[in-house]
Image (cartoon, rainbow, N blue to C red):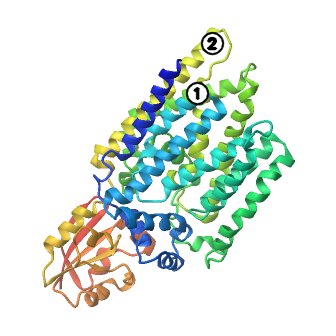
Amino acid sequence: MSNFKYYLITLLTLVLGVLLRFFMISDKSLWLDEGFSLYYSEGSSWQEIISRLLGTDTGDRFQPLYYLVLYYWQQVFGNSEFAVRSLSACLGVGAVIILYYTALQLYGRKHAIWMALFLSVSSYAIYYSQQTRAYAMLLFLAALQMYFFSKALHPRQTQGEVISRWMFWLVTGFSLFCSVLVGIFTLSLCLSHIIIYRQPKRWLQWWLPAALFCLPAIAFYLASPVAATPTKVHVTLSRQPVIQNLVFVIYGLLVGETYGPPIEQLRDGNRVKIILNYLPQLLILAVAIALLFFSLLRVWRLKNNDEQYQKLDNFFALLFIISIGIAILFAIVTKMNWLPRHSFYIYISLAFLIPVAIRKYKIKSKKYQNLFNYASVAIIAILFINLYSTSNYYFNKAYEREDYRVVAQYLSTNQSPSIKSILIYGAPNLLPYYGDTKTINGLGLDTSNLAEEVKTISNNADKVLIAISFQSFWEFKKNFSLEKSMNKLYKLQSKVSFTNFNIYHYVKK
């Protein structure tokens, strides 16, 4: 391939990645988790942001870096949907560029361009590049870690390695303030490095200082009252075996969460029946994954495997396996609902491994050529599946999150002096964000005595509108039934449902 053709393809690939991350970025309403991001990043100073985070028992407490960056970002660009989401989009683009350049240095042009293609059209990466959450920043920081650490993957010390070490130490210590999950990626890198390269002296040169640079973040986390009892951190708890989480994580990392059945349908419906409705496209994905996996296995078994890349391939394969193993242990200990968004560190090793399946070797056999063809078909299929998944995210309403624009408009329209609206669960700051300034924040109400609490907070209004997001989750967590609780003092008049949102019209008995 000529230089001109290569650079043109690279440029078009990166431009495609940029366009997909900014396309329709403000089309959808901010949703629950994004509302929390705005809440934790709002304030008059960075000290107020830190104080607010230290006062919460949610997992957001362990992401101070993202909220501080988002706070300063809003000072410059404002808090419109486009503004707050564009931070993640920029970080998502940055991650693609950094990982592409890392692959170029380690593997060369062909590997780098295929990896860039996957990263650019990745439904997983695009989705989280359009969310006002920390996940795009985590992917960006992990990509930076990988870039600076790549110097350690050369057999001998190379020029500039000392500078790369310092940058790796700084980025690692800095990144740990964005999430404890960075620690999983860092530990996985550390273990994979010593197992594959077996250079104890060089390993210590990289990792002893890295451990020291992590101490400030570790001290910050250990100072938390919940450090001794991780299960007291307010996170979504898992309701299924961890093996189901693992399958969903791999699926989500490969093709995003908007390819098969919508998650919101799986929450409350008959899962088996819903999955069967999407069986044809899931079978297509299963065939593509099987071909890719089989091709990777055969590549590893080739006797003529190029020694230049053998250690690199083994390193990323082991990094993938160790990352999954530690993630499973972390999920079991914390009992958290382990999801693709928590697995950005697994995504990086996966992205490096995929192009390995189509590496060409000097083997003249029909069997090998067939293997290469199958792998090429599998990767191209996965690229198109990602584009299809992304189109679902953009245009298919079945995959939408809750729409606070619609909810705020509905509540505002139905309010009056005698009709009070109360939000029992959701993001209360998003209602005034979309123009509803009168709905009462009822997140702190005692659900065991809900009817009396509603009567008091509404000043004994004749009619109340009860709005609740993710009702089944909240009722499960609080162990109560909204309708039964309200039935003590109120009569249900009607119920209106939006995506992940129910609004009940109650009148006093």
Q: Secondary structure at mark 2?
A: helix
Q: Position of residue 314 (x, y in %)?
A: 72, 35
Residue 128 appearing in the image: no
Q: Position of residue 375 (x, y in %)?
A: 55, 23
Q: Position of residue 484 (x, y in %)?
A: 31, 77
Q: Position of residue 76 (x, y in %)?
A: 38, 64
Whether label 1 touches label 2, CB < 8 Å: no
> Hey, what amino acid is under mark 1?
Arg
Q: Secondary structure at mark 1?
A: helix
Q: Which residue is mark 2?
A: 367
- Quadrant where the C terminus sits is bottom left
User: Residue 103 appears in which quarter of the rendering?
Assistant: top right
User: Residue 268 appears in which quarter of the rendering?
Assistant: bottom left
Q: Please tell me which residue is depicted at 37% across the width and 41% down the height of the picture.
A: 20
Q: Please tell me which residue is depicted at 31% across the width and 70% down the height of the picture.
A: 468
The first of marks 1 and 2 along the sequence is 1
Q: Which residue is mark 1?
A: 109
Determine the CA span between mark 1 and mark 2. Answer: 26 Å
Q: Please tell me which residue is depicted at 30% across the width and 53% down the height of the picture.
A: 26
Residue 217 appearing in the image: yes
